[in-house]
Image (tube, rainbow, N blue to C red):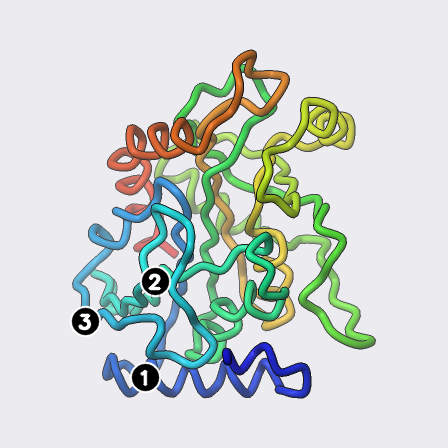
Amino acid sequence: MNPLEDSKANPFEIAKAAAAVIAEKTGVAHHDIALTLGSGWAKAADLIGETVATIDATEVPGFSAPTVVGHLPTIRSIRLSNGKHALVLGARTHYYEGHGVRRVVHGVRTAAATGAKIMVLTNGCGGIKETWADGTPVLISDHINLTADSPLEGANFVDLTDLYSKRLRDIARTVDPDLDEGIYAQFRGPHYETPAEVQMVKHMGGHLVGMSTALEAIAAREAGMEILGVSLMTNLAAGIQKHPLSHTEVLAAGKAAESRISALLAEIIVKL
């Protein structure tokens, strides 16, 4: 049984244990930046620096192999050209897998326990703005959490006013001044959103819809991390796009954009 499934277990102690195993297996005592690479973003790990070690995520407490195509079952330690160390988390757990929110945010909490002060969260998602073409990278400026859940437990009141760092978004725009930004809405999934739900998000001020990131960002803020969120808009959302959605289409759009957006992200990372 995954230790996070025990309701009496302390998720932060499990994160510390996971960080200790990562330090032992990678030989890197401290990481500065952590990345969760969603659909279409995986190649960035090959471009940001020298891989020090790659470990199987299932060897680390609290982690399990990902169930979504396009997510790697590994954790990598990478030395950046500026001398910092980045931790790349490939084993993302999605809320819709039904393992509970502790499992969803375990990677973020582990990253914080390794010493990382910056959390880079990426995803592939649907877009609401018709001016965005498939394959457009979009900086996340805020989110709407529609999961009806939170990673925070007990009377733990965490301010989310500036959850997605303007400072980091400004750094990203020094690499590409044309990067647009938008508000990301996380649904529970795994089904795609209905046209009515997409219109609801539009009226609420949202621009992107997906099934990850928001819960992880909340946990990262709780841990005191600074957050950069970047979405790859793989397709227009239901009702805005006039033909049915498919995961095959999402993967194809991510694949087509992968080299371009991964190079962009890699250039941003070394400036953080």
Q: Earlier in the sequence, mark 3 or mark 2?
A: 3
Name the residue furthest top.
242
Q: Residue furthest right?
A: 155
* The one of 130 and 56 positioned closer to us in this rendering: 56
Residue labelled with disc 2: 88
Q: Is residue 60 above or below residue 258?
A: below
Q: Amino acid at mark 2?
A: Val
- Provide residue 118's location: percent of width, then percent of height: 47, 63
Q: CA distance from mark 1 to mark 3?
A: 11 Å
Residue 3 is left or right of residue 74, and the answer is right
Q: Can you say whether 91 is above or below 200 in the image?
A: below
Q: Are marks 1 and 3 in contact (CB under 8 Å)?
A: no
The disc, 1 or 3, on the residue closer to the chain's N-terminal end is 1
Q: Residue shown at 61%/40% (left/top)?
A: 184
Which residue is at the front of the view, 226 or 82? 226
Direction from residue 58 to residue 229 in the image, left or right: right
Q: Residues within 10 Å of mark 1 (few under 14, many from 20)?
A: some
- Do the CB atoms of the residues marked 1 and 2 lie less than 8 Å apart? no
> What residue would you read off at disc 1?
23
Nearest the viewer among 204 and 186 is 186
First-in-chain label (1 vs 2): 1
x, y (%) of residue 129? 59, 21
Helix, strand or loop under label 2: strand
> Residue beneath label 3, please?
52
Taking the image as shown, residue 163 lies to the left or right of residue 232, namely right
Percent coordinates x, y for residue 59 in the rendering: 33, 78
Above or below — where is 34 with respect to 255?
below
